[in-house]
Amino acid sequence: MLRISGVSVDRTQWMPAPAPAAPWRVASVSPGDLRNLMSLMSASGWRLLLGLDLGHLVATALVEEARAATAILGRSLAGVEIGNEPDLYTRSPSAPFRLLLGDAALRPPEWGLSQYENEISGLRAALAFAGVAAPLYGPDTARLAWLESYAEKQGHGLAALAQHIYPLDRCYRGRLLRTGPSLTSLLSRRTARRESRLIAAVMRVARGHGLPLRIFDLAGHCGRSHHYYHRGNNRPHPVLLPILPEFQSPHQRRARNKPVPRFQRKHGGVLTFGLLLQQRRFNSVDHGP
């Protein structure tokens, strides 16, 4: 499965025809882009999980994009996600992203879980009314606080519960830490225990509601999100996360015999590079139909 989503999806404008860019736009998606993706899916045999813009919500545009993706991609469309990490919408983007995204939050401070669930319920109804049958993955939250409520209220008809888990952080409250994550800290017992606790908590929610589970964005957080750094400098280690061979540099391919994070060894893992994500099926955490 190829997942196209992430922090920029909530500032990506659907452009069915040439038109002036919205002031918040950092990227756009057109029917031509979807046709190019269809060519890639056909050639690779993969299926696409497509993120839709909830951050700057235009319901008609979201429904139109989902309908176009369904028509163009057909069976190659694995599903859609609505927004990315909505539990962080009331915060300014983290420091490393502000040059690209600006410093404005996507929602006012009083916006929270109940407002999010109302928006999602309305959009699901609009998609159904428009005849869009693409499976839905969600909520793609960065933290676990919203997961139980989402599973309870949105679980019916959900293709899979989707959660992000970050073993290590590179920032605190939007500010870069002086000392970034390292392979030593990534492979430490402390990090392994934290990963195990987080994964177990997510699995309990999925099992409790009979839902399949997908874990995305298994990486460091707050900018440089797919890179782990040597202590004391900003040079990326050649192995980083185990990424798809097709997207590895020759130096990374030579480093394949290096150790990989415990989660990947234990659970089959998430292979990630930029916006490209190859997500293997987690048999141990698949529940429901």
Image (tube, helix red, strand yellow):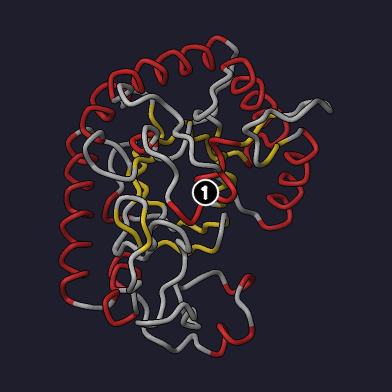
Q: Which quadrant is the C terminus positioned in?
A: top left
Q: Which residue is mark 1?
A: 98
Circle 1 Cα neighbour tier, 10 Å, few/some/many (<14 / 14–19 / ≥20): few
Q: Position of residue 150 (x, y in %)?
A: 28, 28
Q: Residue at x 73, y 39 (%)?
A: 34
In this rendering, position of residue 29 left or right of residue 175: right
Compared with residue 88, is residue 19 higher up or lower down, i.e. above or below? above
Q: Position of residue 230 (x, y in %)?
A: 39, 82
In this rendering, position of residue 221 left or right of residue 194: right
Q: Position of residue 165 (x, y in %)?
A: 31, 54
Q: Residue at x 30, y 50 (%)?
A: 173
Residue type at mark 1: give it: Arg
Q: Quadrant of residue 68?
A: top right
Find numbered disc 1 in the image and state the secondary structure of the residue it sits on: helix
Compared with residue 222, is residue 53 higher up or lower down, i.e. above or below? above
Closer to us: 230 or 256: 230
Q: Quadrant of residue 105?
A: top left
Closer to us: 214 or 144: 144
Residue projecting furthest to the top: 129
Q: Position of residue 220 (x, y in %)?
A: 38, 63
